[in-house]
Image: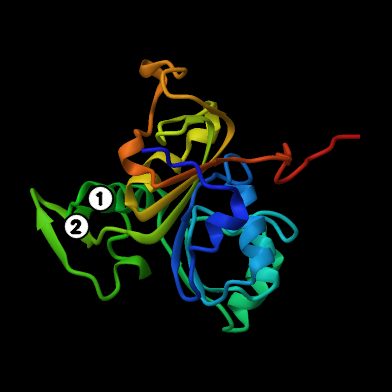
Amino acid sequence: MNKVIAGADAAVALVPDGASVMMGGFGLCGIPENLIKALHRRGTRNLTIISNNAGVDDYGIGILLKTRQVKKMISTYVGENQEFERQFIAGELEVELVPQGTFAERIRAGGAGIGGFYTPTGHGTLVAEGKETRVIDGTHYVLEMPLKADFAFVKAYQGDSLGNLVYRKTTRNFNPMMATAGRITIAEVEELVEPGELDPEAIVTHGIFVQHIFQGEGYEKRIEKRTVVS
């Protein structure tokens, strides 16, 4: 049951052109940065990326956008990436914007095997166009479908060789639910330990959801947007 893979380059070699990939993270916090960089080096193309945001111009998913490796983005917030904006306005990038709570629930539904759910969010707006709607107890709802992907790239603080994962504070964000919604889930961790070394009460993602794991390196504590008062 040892799920350890040699590293990020070996992991992304499994990802073919045209694949759909979920990537954890919120802003630049908790992103699978080793996997993103390896995907950039490999040059895998025509990707559908499912992520809360698109990184910044020179980091995170932004480096994949710069090299035109991304065909479509399914996201909630994209305001910190000028290259994303340029490609979107020019019609060079397919974009599906999803309300953040709906985004989270669609991923959770995908991992839980739920066929769809009704939410009042977005009713009467562009978000609801082309979707089934209904009234339940006097409230208007929109039917939203689950989100799944060929691959899920997740980042955790610690993990063991069986794929059990522990997250640290805000880096937990979208990673646990994405880990359940990928057909193949690849986890990069800051510290890889032996089975039995993790506190069972601290494990958030259980190894049953993870197919491959490796210890990353060179992690940066980037700040997405710095505001300075003089």
The figure's colour scheme reads rainbow
Disc 2, SS: loop
Disc 1, SS: helix
- Is 141 on the left or on the right of 161, as rendered? left
Q: Is 98 in front, or is 28?
A: 28
Type of the residue with mark 2: Gly
- Farthest residue to the left: give it: 137
Q: Is residue 217 above or below residue 93?
A: above
Percent x, y for residue 105?
31, 48
Q: Is 75 in front, or is 9?
A: 9
Q: Can residue 73 be seen? A: no
Type of the residue with mark 1: Ala
Q: Is residue 80 above or below residue 203?
A: below
Mark 2 nearby-residue class (10 Å; few <14, some 14–19, many ≥20): some
Quarter of the image that includes the C terminus? top right
Q: Is 185 in front, or is 21?
A: 185
| Snapshot quadrant of residue 195 | top left
| Snapshot quadrant of residue 227 | top right
Percent x, y for residue 39?
61, 62
Q: Which residue in the structure is indicated by mark 1? A: 109
The label shown at residue 116 is 2
Contact (CB < 8 A) between labels 1 and 2? yes
Percent x, y for residue 163?
41, 36
